[in-house]
Amino acid sequence: MIPRYSRPEMVAIWEPATKFRIWYEIEAHACDAMADLGVIPRENAEAVWKARDVEFDVARIDEIEAVTKHDVIAFLTHLAEIIGHDEARFVHQGMTSSDVLDTTLNVQLVRAADILLADMDALLEALKRRAHEHKMDVRIGRSHGIHAEPVTMGLTFARFYAEMDRNRDRLRAARAEIATGAISGAVGTFANIDPAVEAHVCDRMGLTPEPISTQVIPRDRHAMFFATLGVIASSIENIAIEIRHMQRTEVLEAEEFFSKGQKGSSAMPHKRNPVLTENLTGLARLVRMAVIPAMENVALWHERDISHSSVERMIGPDATVTLDFALARLTGVIDKLVIYPDNMLANMNKFRGLVHSQRVLLALTQAGVSREDAYRLVQRNAMKVWEDGKDFREELLADADVTAALSPAEIEEKFDLGYHTKHVDTIFSRVFGD
């Protein structure tokens, strides 16, 4: 990803130097295990660790690869240059390139997942704090973009919290699924390497052995991982879209924090645009862009081909770096989001009580009016509000058919906002457990 949408900790996971360091650790741990088994001399295994503190020369490896046309061989050649060709002669014994490449990729994805999980913890904390802060601040709920019934801003935040909490569980499961390694040799039969080597390497690298690999780790695991990132990205967009709506000039129930000296438009000095959440909508598309290629990587020829390799070299860094940045950006937006409770009430009252129509409908049916007639009575008064700007309560009180079933006091009671918030505590208990 470009630096504009990148954070250093996640970027570092995908740097060539990091990759080569992981390759080295896998090879060194494999040598230790083979020495324990008596397959290679102990002194050769110990010699490999001479490169423990060496910074591998990425340019030199690239130079060798330009000749060999093989990245793992280029690395092994460079390693031999460092520790000595005779000392390095048992490195990669019985292994195949995918043992190194696949195990490394999964180490990187696990490390990326740990960063993303920490990102989600920060976002969840911000959502929870804002939910409790605006727990009972009433705003209008909307369906199809049209006023429906009252909700609260706290419930809006709580809804997003619950969604992201589910996403955190999904990511933890995806992390566990991707945390496997394979050191099983050509076509995965362990013919030239003992399974104990795989167990030792995986233990040292924080992975579990892949139960059965071919010459590669099965790509359904990776498909699940990137699909999970795609779902998280969609949830980010879900939140961003709501904030973008709330910041519309004619709505203005909330807006992104506008800092001192910030400019909204090169042409119109008055502008305060939802640029961060618009950016998040775009970044979500980029993360989801990795999902279909990851799915298509599952179908590989026989025991191995490399049609997946070019895909993963791009989607691994791009998807994780982008999602890391997006989660951090969204956390900042939520943390500083400016809320306007007075505007929320003004918007809800824009159609003069219309949002209480269902309560009147239900009251009429409770009073013995058929549902069909009750709906007709409520709707004909509601349409006067839509079309003529009338006051819904006044129209109901003036309708003889309505007052024949409901007293003025009963009609008045149906306009109590507190009715709509009586179960907020119950919902919060379900979401937050407190």
Image (cartoon, rainbow, N blue to C red):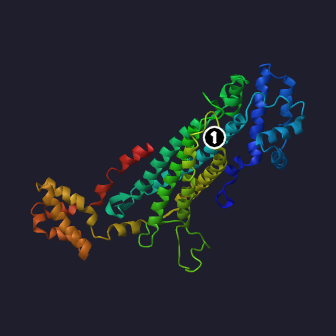
Q: In this view, does 411 lie above or below 301?
A: below
Residue 392 in which image quadrant: bottom left
Q: Is residue 2 above or below residue 70?
A: below
Quadrant location, the N terminus: bottom right
- Residue at point 45%, 73% (across, down): 249
Q: Is residue 36 above or below residue 133?
A: above
- Residue at point 19%, 55% (across, down): 362
- Residue at point 75%, 27% (across, down): 94
Closest to the observer: 135 or 171? 171
Q: Where residue 178 sits: x, y (%)?
A: 60, 37
Quadrant location, the C terminus: top left
Q: Is residue 87 something that shows in the picture?
A: yes
Closest to the observer: 344 or 283? 283
Which type of secondary structure does the marked residue at label 1 adopt? Answer: helix
Q: Is 359 displayed left or right of 13 in the figure?
A: left
Q: Is residue 415 something that shows in the picture?
A: no
Q: Is 251 displayed left or right of 186 in the figure?
A: left
Q: Where residue 359 sits: x, y (%)?
A: 23, 58
Q: Is 357 displayed left or right of 273 in the figure?
A: left
- Residue at point 63%, 40% (across, down): 110
Q: Say which amino acid is labelled 1.
A: Val
Mark 1 = which residue? 110
Q: Where residue 52 sits: x, y (%)?
A: 83, 37
